[in-house]
Each structure stands twice: as structure tokens, then as C-alpha cells.
Amino acid sequence: MNAPHFEKVALIGIGLIGSSIAINMRERGLAREIAIATRRPETLKRAEELGLGTSYHLDTADAVRDADLVILCLPVGSCGAAAAAMAPSLKPGAIVSDVGSVKASVVQQVQPHLPANVHFVPGHPIAGTEQSGPDAGFLELFENRWTILTPLPETDEAATQRLRAFWEATGAMVEIMTPEHHDLVLAIVSHVPHLIAYNIVGTAADLETVTQSEVIKFSASGFRDFTRIAASDPTMWRDIFLTNRDAVLEMLARFSEDLASLQRAIRWGDGDALFDLFSRTRAIRRSIVQAGQDTEEANFGRLPHRKDSWNETPPAAE
Amino acid sequence: MNAPHFEKVALIGIGLIGSSIAINMRERGLAREIAIATRRPETLKRAEELGLGTSYHLDTADAVRDADLVILCLPVGSCGAAAAAMAPSLKPGAIVSDVGSVKASVVQQVQPHLPANVHFVPGHPIAGTEQSGPDAGFLELFENRWTILTPLPETDEAATQRLRAFWEATGAMVEIMTPEHHDLVLAIVSHVPHLIAYNIVGTAADLETVTQSEVIKFSASGFRDFTRIAASDPTMWRDIFLTNRDAVLEMLARFSEDLASLQRAIRWGDGDALFDLFSRTRAIRRSIVQAGQDTEEANFGRLPHRKDSWNETPPAAE
């Protein structure tokens, strides 16, 4: 049990990330009071049933009153309206942050509403699953994962350091960069991969020569990995593409250019070009496993393929 | 223990699929003799150390002598040469099959070499991991996975049924279709997904604005799933793209057309178009989980993200 990092923390939104932060605060004693606000009464009720907070609010302004730290855990497109709603009730000296997957747009949306006497430190925990809602959260979500903070040039350094210590207490590693660089990095490691996963799943569903039931039956040959990513929250991802437009379009242009070149290699039977690329990409996988960012087990260590055994302990490796 | 399905089976090639078949035959008693042939002495030695067979051969013709079933477990591009080498030694009445991810090309390569008195039943187990070599095989690989057989119009029906029973004894489900339809199905559920995974990993490695170390650090946001696929065997995948060219190019054209339309939706801020696609793709994921072709656990049930815990038992779900 750590000493509390904050007397009172308000979470605005209580989906996968919000509930995982709440569980961390509760289990690790990071805050004395946890105020939870969300717009939908059913979601708020569920958060209360799960015991995620110490007070529950349908009104954002109510939740943030007296809070030392306010974290917006909302789809990127909803951050501006939430900032406007809570601004009059913010405590002087409070730290305001968020968890959005796009940072320049959040700064643009939120900053104009905030009074001069609060500290705005935008943030983004690089962690998640394809699941959403207050039931999806878990304690270990941030462990050994990076959280990026993107303070503005005028942000108080002490506020940034307090927020860094808070995230580190959840098990996260913290990196600091500009909002613009963050958005470029995320465009290539996250946004474009999600876009092409969504896209191929859509393409497969629309074919005339291959039926949807064939696509589902034979998905284990690679396609099923894409469907997991393409099962992510639609609202969250719509907002990401609308608000990180320029970086996504830039990276997508590079992707398409490279794909055209691969297509040409296939058409003209250039096996060496294919083999060279396929060998190069293998090395990157090794680096990711070595950096502790993924398991080295085959198929991500998925359990054997029997429906009735998904919840059993996996057998020892051969 | 089943009654043996065959007196003698010869496996030509002993990588991930070959070794998994061998382990199935050994553990489930599907054959009395298992002859293993491979070109590289080190690989053959390793197969012998692992006890995968009952005899070991550097010469393909030696291995197939007296075999009732011969399975080519080779990259697609090597099947023609192997067929030529073994043809004179094949036992009359033997069944010849393969495990290649492309079927029309295997038929073209292999069929001309085979004597009229053997039964050719091309096959493809839709199962695998990103790992390769004789150490990668395991007993459960085919369990609850589909194996597709693509007999030719002139193929003896009894031979097809014997091979079907053999595959079912490994835990596989069997489907029969034409080689051409198989190649279209696989192009969309496997070949194009692998191609775009290889492609985006290559694109990410070549950027100037984002460093390779950033790509590796922040890979957990989606990218790492693609790197697993892009770590698959380079020779095998080169051969797949070279031999299933037409179907891959056709499916790739559809993919690119759809991607251009998504790109346009992002450029023009058409949030509804994005939201509609992202909701549709979620339903396909649910169908795949319901069909028992993937786990419903978040992140494929990957263990918590600590390097030292990869090999421990996962905790109970929250």
C-alpha cells in the first residue's frame, strides 16, 4: 500500500481505461476519494455495483469539485464538451489530464476551457484490449506498458512529475514527448494498424466469391488476429481517425506506397524482394519480445483450440 | 490408441506441420512406420533426436519406398522437385498428399510426375503458428481446426475418405473443395492478411519521423499483433505469394479499393461511414469466437505484461 498520491481523484468516463485506473487506485491506495462521473445512468450504476469509486455522479461538475486530479477517460471527440462542463467547478491548483489516443486534438479542445489556475498535463496510457465498458478493467493493464505524457511548454514541471509518479505507481513506465510527435508515433504503431484491420475484415465480409461462413470457419489462418483488433470500440476509433487525420493520412500514404511495391513484386515474380522483406520483419518481432512488450510463445500462448478448454490451464510447452 | 490407419507413412519435410503430423501419428498410433526425409542433415538429426519417426532419410526416394501414404510437408515451391524425385519409388496404390497453403499450383507441379497407379489427394491443414522447424510441432495443432482436401475429378473416392479419416484422427475437421476455390478462400483469410502485416511492419521500420526503438517500445497499441504474423517463415511465404499470384492480386485489389474509400472518409470527416464499418466488423469477431475458432479472452488471453511471468499460470479472470 503506497501513501495516497492524491486526496481526491475524479474520473470522467468509466470504460476500460477509467475502470482500470479506478481499480489501481483502490487496490494500491493511490487516492483517498475516487469520484466517478459518466453520462449514462446504467453505466454509473454498474460502476457502483463494481465498487470502483467512493462517489458517483451523473454531473461532471459535481464530480470534479475539490478534486486534486481529474482524468478524462472519454473518447477523444468528447473531451472538449467535458472540459467546458467541468471548468467552472475545478479546484485551483488541480491537475487535469486525459487518456486519449490523440493528443494535439485534445489540447486544442480542452485547453481553451481551462482556467489559468489549473495544470493541464495530457496523457495516454499505451494499454488496452479489444473489450470496453466498466467490467473490462483490470489491475495489471498498465504494468510494464508505457504511458506517454505530453505537457505543454507552459505546464508546471511539478504537476507533470506528480502525474508521472501516479502512473508509475500503477506499474506503468512513463515517457514524455510533444503532442505532435505522440500523434505521429501512434499513427504508425496503432491507428493505421487498426484501420487496415477494420478494412480487411470489411473487405472479407463483402466478397461474392467467398462466403462469410467460409471466412469465419477458416479464420485461424491469420485473419482471426485482425478480427480481434477490428472488434475494438467503434466510437473511440471513429474519434481517433477524425482527430488524428493528418498523421493517419501521412502514414497511410506510406503504407499504400509500400504495398503497391509488394504488389508489383508479386505480379512480376520477384521472389527475392519478397524474401528480403519477410526476413527483415522477423527481426523486429524478436526485438519486441526482447523488450518485454509481447510473449514469445507461439500464437501469443493461446490455449489449445477446444472450446471447452479455454478456461483451463495451458499444458507445458512441448 | 486407434488402430493404425496406415502401415507406413512417409513425411517429406519435417518443419512445424510435418513434426506435428509425426507427433500425432506417434502419440495416437496412426501408423506403424514413420519414414522422415529432409534435405538438411542437421534437421534430420534433430528429428531423430526428437524421436519423430522410425526411419530417417536424406534421400526422398528411399523414404517413400513401401509407404502407403506420402505427405509432402514442404514450402509450396519445392513440391514439384520432390514429386519428381520420389515418383519412381512410389508403391502402387499409395496415397500422395501435401500440406501446402496453395493448391492449384501444387496440382500443376506434382500431378505430371506421378505414376497413374497412385492416388493424389492434395490437402491443407489450416493450422500453424509463427514458429517453424522440427521443434515447433505439437500434438494439439490440428485440434478443432479445418483441414481442406482438394481431390481432382479423377481422384479415387476411397483414397479421399481414407485421408479424411486420418486427418480426423488428429482432431481436425475436414472440408472438401476444388483447388481453385481453396486458393480464393485462403487469399482473403490468410495470404492478404499476411501480406499487409509484412507490409506495415516494413513501413514502420523505414520511417524517418518515428524511430525503430519507438515502434518497438509502443508496439502494444496494436502493432505487435502484426509483428507476430510478420515473423512467419520467409521461404514458405515467398512461395505462397509467387504461386497464388492471381487470387492474391484479386483480393489485394479489393482491399486497396476499400482502403481508398476509408481514406476518403477520414479526409472528409465522414464519421458515420467509419462508425458503420467499425460496428459491422465487431459482429464478425463474435461469430469467430462462437465458432470456436478463437478465444474470447481479452488480448487472446495473453499473460500479464511482465517479462518474468510469461511462463507462469495466468491469474483467474477479473
Image (spheres, coloured by chain):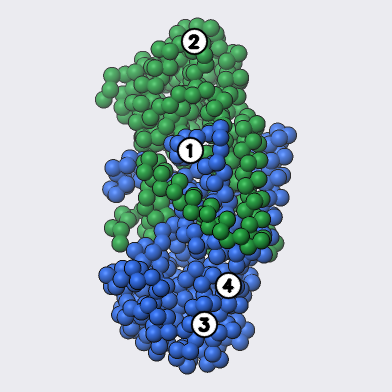
Chain colours: A green, B blue
Observer-nearest of A249 and B316 = A249
Q: Amino acid at mark 4?
A: Lys
User: Do the CB atoms of the residues marked 2 and 4 lie less than 8 Å apart?
Assistant: no
Distance between the alpha carbons at the discs numbered 1 and 3: 45 Å
**Toward the viewer: A60 or A303?**
A303
Q: Earlier in the sequence, mark 1 or mark 4?
A: 4
Q: Are marks 1 and 3 in contact (CB under 8 Å)?
A: no
Q: Secondary structure at mark 4?
A: loop
Quarter holding the C terminus of chain B is: top left
Looking at the rendered image, the disc whose residue lies closer to the viewer, 1 or 4, is 1
- Tell me the mark number nearer the camera, choosing from 3 and 2: 3
Residue that numbered label 4 is attached to: B103
Give neighbour class at mark 3: few <14, some 14-19, many 20+ (Cα, 10 Å): some
Q: Which residue is mark 3?
A: B84
Reading the image, the residue beneath label 1 is B212
Residue at the image position 41 percent from the left and 73 percent from the top = B39
Three-letter amino acid code of the residue under disc 2: Val
Looking at the image, is mark 1 or mark 3 earlier in the sequence? 3
- Using the rendered image, report if marks 1 and 2 lie on a common chain: no
Chain containing mark 3: B
* Residue that appears at 47% across and 71% down: B74
Q: Nearer the viewer, mark 3 or mark 4?
A: 3
Q: Nearer the viewer, residue A76 or B106?
A: B106
